[in-house]
Amino acid sequence: MVTVPAKPYDFELQPDKAALLIIDMQRDFIEPGGFGAMLGNDVTQLEPTIKPLKALLAAARAAGMLVMHTREGHKPDLSDLHETKRTRGRGTTTIGDEGPMGRILIIGEPGQDIIPDLYPIAGEPVIDKPGKGAFYATELAYLVAQHGLTQLIVCGVTTEVCVHTTVREANDRGIDCLVLSDCTGSYFPEFHETALRMISAQRGILGWVGDSTGVIAALTEPAEPAAMS
Ligand code: TIU
């Protein structure tokens, strides 16, 4: 057990029962011409999450912690897309239409993939999710059970949409979530701040909020020296 500074109080990290869960760091949300831009957002707002997340990802891999990635997206035949989601927003282009990075939010298209800086390596599960929550209609619950996880370090975008929905789903499944303020981001800075406050408020009603520095320090902490005989 290692202690990570967090709100509303320190998070007792159990590295063997924890995984790093990186939510939807996809070109479709972070680069121009994708789903995020199609919704009318300023995608540059998400850029500051990349650098700290890259450092955290390297530390998690070096520590041997399980890393899981999610990607919001739909099957090419749109059979897993609710009509409500397809038509919401009344935009001229929508999910499944052609864009500069291929068909918008479609599995296998360049835009739906994870950004090169945070690209998964062999052995790291990549979970395609049709909804905002990472547990809805995915294999995540099976992976959590198979790996005996009781804690998730949650990062990615956007704080108030897919990160929040996933944290709420995890919380209701008995999983403690530590959400990292510098490794999550929103198109709306005020929503980011408020979403984080909503997690740690009420003595941690949905979980904990920390940052990458605290987790990296915990993951790189030297082992306790063996007692002298
Ligand atoms: N639009 C927005 O803020 N988010 C999403 O649509 N998906 C995720 O948060 N990944």
Image: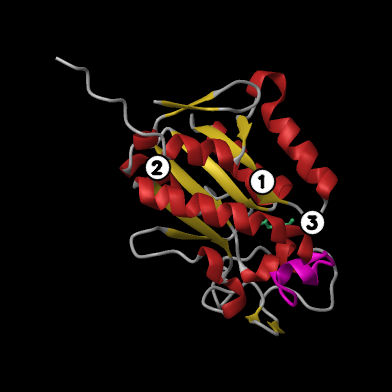
Residue 118: image x %, image y %? 52, 63
Residue at image coords 43%, 39%:
219
Is residue 161 depicted above or below 100 in this figure? above
Give the magenta part as a residue range: 31-43
Nearest to the eye among marks 3 and 1: give it: 1
Element at label 3: loop
Some atom of ligand 1 lies within 8 Å of the CB belonging to the residue at label 3? yes
The three-letter code of the residue at mark 1 reads Asp
What is the three-letter code of the residue carrying label 3?
A: Tyr
Residue topped by disc 2: 144
Most common secondary structure along the magenta stretch = loop
In front of the other: 5 or 75: 5
Task: Please tell me the numbered disc located at residue 182.
Answer: 1
Q: Position of residue 222 (x, y in %)?
A: 36, 34
Residue 24 seen in render: yes
Sequence-wise, the earlier of marks 3 and 2 is: 2
Looking at marks 3 and 1 on the same chain, the residue that comes earlier in the sequence is marked by 1
Marks 3 and 1 sit apart, C-alpha to C-alpha, by: 14 Å
Residue 13 lies, in percent from the top left, at 45, 30
Q: How many neighbours does mark 3 have within 10 angstroms: few (below 14), some (14-19), or many (20 or more)?
A: many
Mark 1 or mark 2: whose residue is earlier in sequence: 2
* Mark 1 surroundings within 10 Å by alpha-carbon count, few (fewer than 14), some (14 through 19), many (20 or more): some
- Taking the image as shown, residue 163 lies to the left or right of residue 136, namely right
